[in-house]
Image (spheres, coloured by chain):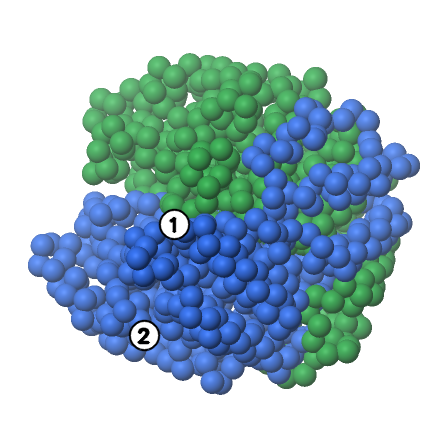
Chain colours: A blue, B green
């Protein structure tokens, strides 16, 4: 960097960061000119960069030139308006500014004392968000519960699984770990299985109960009850249920009230994963999807998915924060301090896997303040309207079929094979996925969940911050054109 | 935000982000005017902010005013030149720019295909850093090993502990989890105990072996061998050793070559935690501290501590990446893609706890390029010279005693009580800590590790990016003045 090593010189920061702002603003100005899904081949970058770090400093301009010519071609543009894959991971001006400010302060907020504002703002902002979602008061920081920002829904699922595990092991003895059983539907996110692997729950004791079209791929309370009864009968110990509101494959919604009754009577921990769909519940007309949340022990939604808050920001609320702390606290001497010892404060290090943590509440606070509830509701409604628009258009093309009910901003559909070639349905749709994604004009993804009849299913998920109706229309056109070409080759 | 909801409008981003740059640059310009350790009381922020999120948008200026008047007073300023607590967590212009760019792109790089550049740059940059540290080739991505950026050293320790756990359980059967034993010195970071808790290793099977002054608080190979033999004799299964290069309390260095021989002959996983001191090993004169690293299975250093890379950026290298992947992979249909199925690429989701991940390699790449190796070496050497300077000055004051050998940039010391009041040594030093930290003029921390003779010991850790000799001199003066006052009251 020009002018020798002044690693945090205010004026050097000012000058260079202004350049970076323009670079990033220009990126957004031109974002539609990039292929959405990167078209590079494995190993491409190795050929473009030197084999070792430089001895002498290089200029920011050289680095930015490399970003433009070597890095951006290898980026899949999640913020592109033509991004319809997986679920979105929204950025926004407010989210970006919050991330900048957090990086500017660069504190490590493991304990209250290492930056009281970081802990306290997180408690306040998660209370704000809990109120927007109309969560029961038990989840607020004013009682025995509270919210915490995790990196991802995977970490949220892991920490509550550990809390639940240790709670039951304190009663039945730690050698009984091999008897613990966790439950979820076969539509639940893979992070639950991973959490079980990590926490030492036997893989065969992670029950992913079969769902089907009769419940619109939601977990059936009857099948949960039956599984629990069977497990108890053979001496196993049911301890954890993960219900999902808005599954990854098809946004199915598990019936929380009935599931909550079952976990209550079996003294199990009930976690609700609304990583994607939770955001929609700030709109009164979608709030009913989390009716029954009062029976849950923990609730998770990803503000970094569909709430304009830069990745990562996964909001987790628990009713009993002590259960988390009993599993995750360590209290070495070098971190002791008066405020913590006097039990006056929250030390979020004991609510999460890592010790250190960033000032992530800043970005969520800025999103809430710079946009306000009404704008955020409009934003969600607009995406759902765009998905509905896509669903209507593709339903009008008889070559396509919508294969699962649309509840939020995801449409699951497939291209139908000709009647005499029904056995090539899966290949046809896999080929269509490849064909459209290879154009670089849009990016969609797929699922092949057993429950969606084992069909290779295409997923069109609206959620990028710049998506407008014209992008949806254009995406449909590419899909239709590629379908025409593929059907002709059959 | 002015002008309605255009959540990622390029010109709105440009205008507002320029304002944020100036806000952050001004913060650094004035950083010495803040109390280093925040002086607020628990619950202070609750009184200053409203009880719920606004319905209507507010202006950026309003938010920045609140940051200035309500948030910054609650921040402990880790980047202040007067910050000497814990270990530092460096920011820098380059690290900040990298974080900005990562937030600007805001992609979620769980699999190669979700942004090939993110995975490939991470592999390349960690190979670069491995070469600067002269790690054995086994740790490079070109063989069976490779590097990965974890959030924190805690996560690094956890993932390798899980890999080691599952490797041995595949041989002895998963019901033997209660027999597994992990080892480390009583100086090891609390993250090891936490990793054991999470992974279901029985707390009483996490052996923290006693160290003392005779080994300068390093783990003694003899005591390790004895513990292992005893455990084997009673039917337990030693599986994991964490050696530390630069312990938290006193920067002790465990004897890697001898420890490596022991783990090898007992077929245990050998993890080396050099979270803090690893950075110094880019200087030839400090590289010998990791001699013996060729016997380790994994090695960790935090680029976010002392390597000018914004938090979080913890670099972990393993020799056998498949051991990690076998523990941590899940492969749901919705994430399947040709590149991954063909085994052509690395999918970092299978090397870590979370699924999603940020583009953290950008900031490390920018630090390496914008500063270059020689500047980074000078930076490390300067901090060590400043610590040596402090050590010399405080040694000249007979009221103080340096209580552990200084190896890097940490000085451990205490204020000696008068001869007739030796029993108040701990209270005296605790009072001194409070007295200096309450001035807001500097921030230091303490330790009371049993091994440092149980003494309440003060820690003076040089490492903030703006620290110069004058800050060290001024800190010493405050310490001496407060010592004078305290001794007068005895």
> Mark 2 or 1 closer to N-term?
2
Q: Is residue B381 visible?
A: no
Q: Secondary structure at mark 2?
A: helix
x and y percent of residue A140 in the render? 47, 74
x and y percent of residue A344 in the render? 53, 65
Q: Nearer the viewer, residue A198 or A400?
A: A400
Q: Residue at x 36, y 60 (%)?
A: A418
Disc sitting over residue A256 in the figure:
2
Residue B15: quarter of image = bottom right
x and y percent of residue B362 in the render? 68, 42
Decide: few, some or many residues near mark 2? Use Cα within 10 Å; few <14, some 14-19, many ≥20: many
Of all residues, the one furthest to the left in this rendering is A233
Residue A61: quarter of image = top right
Q: Nearer the viewer, residue B77 or B313?
A: B313
Does B404 appear above or below A93?
A: above
Q: Nearer the viewer, residue B131 or B144?
A: B144
Task: Please say if the residues under marks 2 and 1 sit with CB atoms less than 8 Å apart.
Answer: no
Does B210 appear above or below B33?
A: above
Q: Is residue A225 visible?
A: yes
Q: Residue at x 53, y 42 (%)?
A: B112
Report which residue position mark 1 lands on.
A427
**Mark 2 and mark 1, same subunit?**
yes
Left of B134 or right of it: where is A101? right
Disc sitting over residue B19 in the figure:
none
Q: Residue at x 77, y 78 (%)?
A: B3
């Amino acid at each position: 960097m020009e002018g020798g090593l002044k690693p945090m010189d205010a004026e050097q920061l000012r000058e260079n960061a202004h350049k970076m702002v323009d670079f990033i603003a220009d990126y957004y100005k031109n974002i539609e000119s990039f292929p959405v899904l990167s078209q590079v081949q494995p190993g491409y970058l190795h050929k473009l960069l030197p084999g070792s770090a430089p001895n002498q400093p290089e200029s920011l301009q050289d680095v930015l030139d490399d970003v433009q010519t070597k890095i951006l071609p290898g980026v899949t543009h999640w913020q592109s308006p033509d991004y319809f894959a997986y679920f979105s991971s929204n950025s926004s001006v407010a989210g970006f500014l919050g991330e900048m400010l957090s990086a500017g302060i660069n504190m490590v907020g493991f304990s209250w004392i290492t930056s009281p504002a970081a802990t306290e703002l997180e408690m306040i902002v998660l209370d704000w968000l809990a109120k927007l979602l109309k969560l029961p008061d038990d989840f607020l920081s004013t009682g025995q519960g509270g919210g915490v920002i995790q990196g991802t829904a995977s970490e949220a699922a892991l920490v509550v699984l550990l809390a639940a595990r240790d709670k039951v092991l304190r009663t039945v003895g730690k050698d009984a770990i091999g008897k613990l059983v966790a439950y979820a539907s076969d539509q639940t996110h893979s992070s639950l299985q991973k959490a079980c692997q990590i926490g030492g729950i036997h893989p065969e004791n992670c029950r992913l109960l079969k769902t089907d079209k009769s419940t619109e791929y939601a977990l059936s309370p009857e099948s949960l009850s039956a599984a629990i009864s069977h497990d108890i009968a053979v001496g196993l110990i049911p301890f954890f249920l993960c219900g999902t509101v808005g599954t990854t494959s098809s946004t199915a919604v598990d019936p929380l009230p009935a599931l909550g009754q079952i976990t209550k009577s079996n003294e199990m921990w009930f976690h609700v994963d609304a990583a994607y769909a939770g955001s929609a519940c700030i709109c009164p007309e979608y709030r009913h999807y989390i009716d029954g949340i009062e029976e849950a022990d923990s609730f998770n939604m990803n503000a970094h998915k569909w709430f304009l808050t830069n990745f990562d920001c996964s909001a987790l609320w628990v009713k009993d924060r002590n259960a988390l702390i009993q599993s995750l606290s360590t209290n070495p001497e070098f971190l002791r301090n008066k405020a913590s010892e006097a039990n006056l404060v929250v030390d979020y290090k004991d609510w999460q896997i890592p010790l250190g943590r960033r000032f992530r509440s800043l970005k969520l606070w800025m999103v809430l303040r710079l946009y306000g509830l009404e704008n955020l509701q409009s934003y969600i409604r607009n995406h759902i309207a765009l998905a509905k628009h896509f669903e209507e258009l593709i339903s009008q093309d008889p070559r396509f079929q919508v294969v699962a009910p649309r509840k939020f901003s995801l449409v699951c559909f497939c291209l139908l094979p000709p009647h005499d070639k029904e056995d090539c349905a899966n290949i046809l749709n896999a080929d269509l996925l490849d064909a459209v994604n290879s154009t670089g004009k849009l990016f969609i993804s797929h699922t092949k969940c057993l429950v969606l009849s084992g069909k290779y299913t295409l997923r069109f998920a609206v959620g990028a911050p710049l998506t407008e109706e014209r992008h949806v229309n254009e995406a449909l056109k590419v899909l239709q054109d590629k379908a025409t070409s593929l059907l002709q080759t059959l």
